[in-house]
């Protein structure tokens, strides 16, 4: 039973999200195939939902990490053959990062590896609750994204 708190409701919400993030990161990394970290999986997941390759700086901004951190993550995934880095055809200096077929397969393997943990959680959280929470959290994310970008 959660303790009562005098902290503001939104503070408590973000505190819970932070704790869930830590717990889910540990859960994910315990089962990730291909020696993937959560950061690497997250980038594969992000790229799998994009129609076109993305510049590293745009990826760094999307993940709120430094360009150096993103370059390191990209390099590790490139070494595994999960992403491909290509020069910008317009100026040759910039680069684009896209997911490979092998990367798509690795993402699929990772989602499958999470299956037992997600099935366990599904025994404790209803699908309706998960959908409702996701919709509400997406609204908060969109507000924070707009504020960051504005």
Image (cartoon, helix red, strand yellow):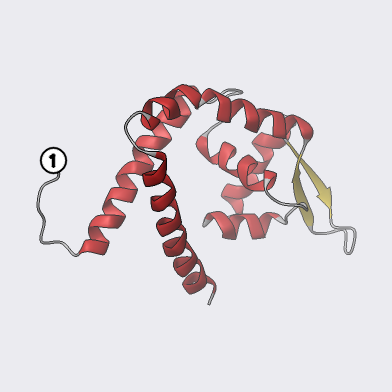
* Residue 10 x, y percent position in the rendering: 27, 63
Nearest to the observer: residue 115 or residue 52? 115
Residue at the image point whose x is 44% and y is 48% from the top: 131
Total marks drawn? 1
Question: Measured along the vertical axis of the image, is residue 138 above or below residue 112?
Answer: below
* Residue 149 x, y percent position in the rendering: 54, 72
Is 65 on the left-hand or right-hand side of 18? right
Residue under pointer 1? 1
Is 41 on the left-hand or right-hand side of 133? right
The crowd level at tag 1 (other Cα within 10 Å; few <14, some 14-19, many 20+) is few
Is 75 on the left-hand or right-hand side of 123? right
Residue 104: quadrant of the picture: top right
Residue at the image point whose x is 60% and y is 55% from the top: 60
Look at the image and tell me in which quarter the N terminus lies: top left
* Residue 5 x, y percent position in the rendering: 11, 56
Question: Measured along the vertical axis of the image, is residue 113 above or below residue 56?
Answer: above
Residue at the image point whose x is 50% and y is 25% from the top: 115
Nearest to the observer: residue 58 or residue 14? 14
Residue 62: quadrant of the picture: bottom right
* Residue 22 x, y percent position in the rendering: 36, 40
Residue 59: quadrant of the picture: bottom right
Q: Residue furthest front?
A: 128
Name the secondary structure under disc 1.
loop
Question: Measured along the vertical axis of the image, is residue 109 above or below residue 130?
Answer: above
């Amino acid at each position: 039973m959660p303790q009562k708190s005098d902290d503001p409701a939104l503070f408590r919400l973000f505190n819970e999200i932070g704790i869930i993030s830590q717990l889910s990161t540990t859960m994910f990394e315990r089962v990730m195939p291909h020696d993937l970290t959560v950061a690497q999986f997250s980038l594969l997941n992000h790229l799998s939902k994009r129609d076109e390759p993305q510049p590293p700086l745009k990826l760094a901004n999307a993940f709120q990490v430094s360009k150096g951190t993103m370059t390191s993550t990209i390099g590790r995934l490139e070494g595994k053959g999960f992403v491909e880095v290509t020069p910008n055809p317009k100026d040759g200096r910039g680069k684009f990062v896209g997911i490979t077929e092998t990367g798509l397969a690795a993402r699929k393997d990772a989602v499958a590896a999470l299956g037992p943990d997600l099935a366990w959680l599904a025994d404790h959280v209803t699908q309706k609750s998960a959908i409702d929470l996701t919709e509400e959290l997406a609204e908060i994310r969109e507000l924070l994204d707009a504020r960051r970008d504005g």
